[in-house]
Amino acid sequence: MTKMKIVKTLFLKAPPEHVWKFLTEADQLALWFMRGREDLAEGGDYVLETNSYGKEGEKVCWGQVLEMKKPERLVHTFAHDAFKGVDSTCTWTLEAVKGGTVLTLVHEGWERVGDDAFTLAAEHDKGWDEFLGRLRRVAN
């Protein structure tokens, strides 16, 4: 299977230190993605919970933080029920530029999720567009 990856880039009018909080702090994650049970910590596990009415607090996705280089780089595994016990990997890179931050997400490892890899990658590609649009609104 071809190695697939999702790559998204945002140009945010805020410094990396500000954007970093939205990737790592539980209450800030909730503003654009899902609430974390706790802030992300290097080497630690994380769980994100739904904000959906009637389902508040239900575990949606989870993983382990592999690398945190504040405020430049965050790497974590990413899984949920559709992955059937397999992890993918998300790498966030924050580059300080004059006027703000260039934020890049690379989500890869789709070949590990099996026969539905293309369908799952396509769904996540669309989902990241929606969530990153929210991040743009709250982090700018």
Image (tube, helix red, strand yellow):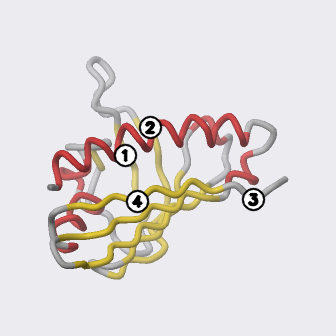
Residue located beneath label 2 in the image:
60
72 in relation to 129, above or below? below
Residue 9's label in the rendered image is 4
Location of residue 13 in the rendering, given as x and y in whole percent from the top left corner: 16, 63
- Sequence order check, earlier mark of 4 and 2: 4
Q: In which quadrant of the rendered view does residue 128 lie?
A: top left
**Residue for point 64% across, 38% down:** 120
Pick whichever of labels 4 and 1 is earlier in the sequence. 4
Give how far apart the Cα atoms at labels 3 and 4 are: 20 Å
Q: Residues within 10 Å of mark 2 (few under 14, many from 20)?
A: some
Q: Residue beneath label 1, please?
A: 48
Q: Which residue is mark 3?
A: 3
Foreground disc of the pair 1, 3: 3
Query: Picture quarter containing residue 30?
Result: top left
Q: Position of residue 115 (x, y in %)?
A: 81, 38
Where is residue 122 drawn, in percent x and y?
61, 38
- Residue 69 position, x and y percent, is 35, 82
- Provide the secondary structure element on which disc 1 rests: strand
Q: Nearer the viewer, mark 3 or mark 2?
A: 3
Residue at (23% x, 58% y) in the render:
22
